[in-house]
Amino acid sequence: MRKRAPLIILTLYLCTACSSARYIEHSEEPRNVQERSADDTGSKPASTFVPVKAKDIPAFTDPLTGLNTNESVVNSRPVAVVINNHHKALPQSGIGQAAICYEVLAEGNITRIIAIFHDFDTQKIGPVRSARHYFLDFAMDYDAIFVHHGGSPQAYDALEETGIAALDGMKLSETFWRDPERANVPGMFEHSSYTGEELIRQARERFEFRPEMREGLNAGFLFYDEQTVPAESAGAAFISVAFAQGYESSFEYLDGLYYISTDGKPRIDAETNERLSVENLLIQYAPVKVIAGDTAGRRDVDVVGEGEGLFITNGGSVPLIWKKDSHETPTRWYNKDGSDLYFNRGKTWICVVSPDTAVSIE
C-alpha cells in the first residue's frame, strides 16, 4: 500500500514507504504533524564528529545504549517487560533502568510501555501488564525474554506461533508478586503486579532459556563517537505526541536530555524518585487499526515492513526511514538518503504511532 506524502515539520520531505501485514490488513491515513512557523529555531549546524561503526565500539560497550558496561552484559540476553501505563498505574518502578522504551497504544486509548532492560539490577519492575501481539516484535528486535502478565487472544496466538521465550504472570506466581499497598486498594489490583531482576534471572535459569543473544543477531544501534547534533537537523526543544484524546506524552530538552511527561505531569521512577529522561527519541509511523469484530477494541500495529518517522536527539530533529524484514530480524534505522542512522550514547524512547497522529515540535 502506498502512503500519501504528508506535510511534516520544517518542510522536511519523507520518502514513501510501505508496510506488510502481519495478522490482518491495514488501512493508512496521512499523518497530522503540526508545522513550525518560519520564526521557529532554524537548522542545527552539521556535526564535525566522525561516527564509529558498531565493530569499532570498545568490547565492553552496551549495544543498546553505547555506554560502558561489564563484559558479562555485552552479549547477555535482554529482557522486555510490558509495563502498565494507565494513569492509575503511575508512578512505575524500575523503568528508569530500561535501555529502550517503546510506547504504543493498546485498546482504550491508553498506551503501554515495552521496556527493554539489559544492564540492570532493579528488584522492582512494574506494574506488569498483559501482552498484545505486536509487542512481541519489539522484544524480538533484541532477542529478548518477554515478560508479561496475561495477554489478549491474539497475543497468546503469537506467543505460540513465534515460540519466544516468555514469562507470564498468570502462570508463574513465583516470578511475580502483588504489591499489597496497591492490591488492597479498590480498583488498583490490576495495577499491582511486579517482578524484578533476580526473579527474572531465576526463572530464566529454571526454564533453561538461552542466556546470551542469538549469535549473529546484531541487535542494537550505531552510535556517534561523541555527543552530536545530526547534520542538517532542525531545532527540537519540546516535542508532544498525542497518542489519543486526553493522552499525550511530551519531551522537553535540557542539557542533552529529553525529560518525559504525560499529560503535562513529570514521569518519575518510583524506586529512585528520579525524573525519566532519555538521550534519543524516535517517532515511528506505522499502520494502526482496530481489529474488526474485536469487542474490546483491540488494535493491530504493523511494524514489519518499512515506513517513515523522525529522529530527535541533542536538540535536533531529522526524518528517518525504518525497515524490519521479518518478526525475527531487528528493525534498522536509516536517514532519508538511505545511509545508516547514528544515535547519541544513552537511553532511547520510541513512540510508535499511526501516521495520522498529531505530533508537534517546537
Image (cartoon, rainbow, N blue to C red):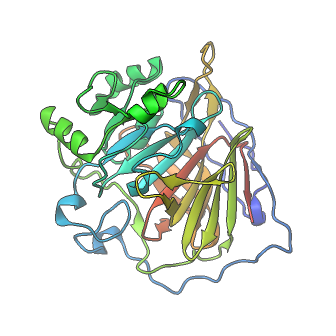
The residue located at (27%, 26%) in the rendering is 173
Q: How many marks?
A: 0
Apparent side of residue 197 relative to residue 13 in the rendered image (left or right): left
Nearer-the-camera pick, 159 or 217: 159
The residue located at (68%, 40%) in the rendering is 2
Image vertical order of residue 248 relative to residue 106, above or below = below
Check the picture and name the quadrant holding the N terminus. top right
Image coords of residue 219 (percent x, y): 34, 54
Nearer-the-camera pick, 121 or 150: 121
The residue located at (33%, 62%) in the rendering is 63
Image coords of residue 7 (percent x, y): 79, 54
The residue located at (40%, 79%) in the rendering is 225
Nearer-the-camera pick, 26 or 123: 123
Image vertical order of residue 45 relative to residue 267, above or below = below
Apparent side of residue 86 relative to residue 212 in the rendered image (left or right): right
Question: Residue 177 occupies which quadrant of the picture?
Answer: top left
Nearer-the-camera pick, 191 or 105: 191
Check the picture and name the quadrant holding the C terminus. bottom right
Q: Residue furthest right?
A: 38
Apparent side of residue 129 relative to residue 281 in the rendered image (left or right): left
Image coords of residue 166 (percent x, y): 29, 32
Question: Residue 337 occupies which quadrant of the picture?
Answer: bottom right
Image coords of residue 322 (percent x, y): 53, 52
Apparent side of residue 265 relative to residue 207 in the rendered image (left or right): right
Please say whether residue 140 is visible from this viewpoint: no
Please say whether residue 308 is visible from this viewpoint: yes
